[in-house]
């Protein structure tokens, strides 16, 4: 069982999960392969084939904030590694992780393996403001912050 969750800023970390799921739904990407989650601003990197247009960034931001405004409960569940393997990609899990896997659910919008701290409800996040995006070497980087 996870006893030392990552010490991310909970509202930003929860927003990152929603950003990831929204990228999957809007652009058929995988979850970010790299991210840097901080209180003031954060960034997520995606394997992608181009930069996003201003209209796409606006649509992405609007969809994220629509999800946040649904006031969804954020919950955790501990399941066995064998059960998790049936429904999640465990490739990024360290080999010595153990047999208990922590799953974070954001309402019925997102579910993923996670060791970080989250808010209890999306209403605690505020709104996401996408600051910029860039594309280099097949990597799309999205920078964002939270607004109250």
Image (cartoon, helix red, strand yellow):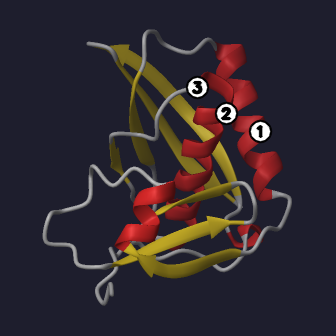
In the image, which is nearer the foreground, mark 1 or mark 2? Answer: 2
Q: Residue at x 55, y 69 (%)?
A: 104
Quadrant assignment, res 113: bottom left
Alpha carbons under labels 2 and 3: distance apart: 6 Å
Label 3: which secondary element: loop
Q: Earlier in the sequence, mark 1 or mark 2?
A: 2
Would you call the spot at circle 2 few (<14 residues within 10 Å), some (14-19), or many (20 or more)? Answer: few
Residue 8 in view of the camera: no
* Mark 2 residue element: helix
Where is mark 1, residue-wise?
63
Please give the name of the residue rendered at 51% of the width and 28% of the height, measured from the top-left corner.
Answer: 29
Q: Which numbered mark, 1 or 3, is in the foreground of this view?
A: 3
Looking at the image, is mark 1 or mark 3 earlier in the sequence? Answer: 3
Residue identified by numbered label 3? 28
Count the labels in the image.
3
Seen at 33% across and 87% down, the residue is: 1
**Residue 99 location (% of width, % of height):** 29, 79
Q: In this orientation, does residue 104 appear?
A: yes
Q: What residue is pinned by disc 2?
A: 25
**What is the quadrant of residue 74 in the picture?**
bottom right
Separation of marks 1 and 3 at Cα, in angstroms: 15 Å
141, above or below 122, in the image: above
- Give the class, few, some or many, for how many residues have Cα within 10 Å of label 3's Cα (few <14, many ≥20): few
Q: As drawn, is 112 to the left or to the right of 100? A: right
User: Please, is residue 89 above or below residue 57 in the view?
Assistant: below
Report the Cα–Cα distance between label 1 and label 2.
Answer: 10 Å
| Residues tagged 1 and 2 counted as in contact (Cβ below 8 A) | yes
Residue farthest to the left? 96
Q: Secondary structure at mark 1?
A: helix
């Amino acid at each position: 069982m996870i006893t030392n969750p990552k010490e991310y800023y909970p509202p930003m970390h929860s927003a990152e999960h929603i950003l990831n799921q929204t990228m999957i739904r809007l652009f058929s990407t995988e979850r970010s392969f790299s991210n840097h989650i901080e209180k003031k601003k954060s960034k997520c990197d995606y394997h992608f084939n181009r930069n996003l247009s201003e209209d796409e960034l606006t649509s992405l931001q609007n969809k994220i904030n629509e999800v946040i405004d649904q006031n969804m409960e954020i919950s955790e569940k501990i399941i066995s590694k064998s059960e998790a393997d049936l429904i999640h990609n465990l490739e990024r899990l360290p080999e010595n992780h153990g047999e208990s896997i922590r799953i974070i659910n954001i309402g019925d919008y997102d579910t993923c393996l996670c060791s970080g701290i989250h808010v209890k409800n999306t209403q605690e996040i505020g709104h996401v403001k996408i600051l910029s995006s860039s594309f280099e070497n097949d990597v799309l980087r999205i920078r964002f912050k939270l607004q109250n």
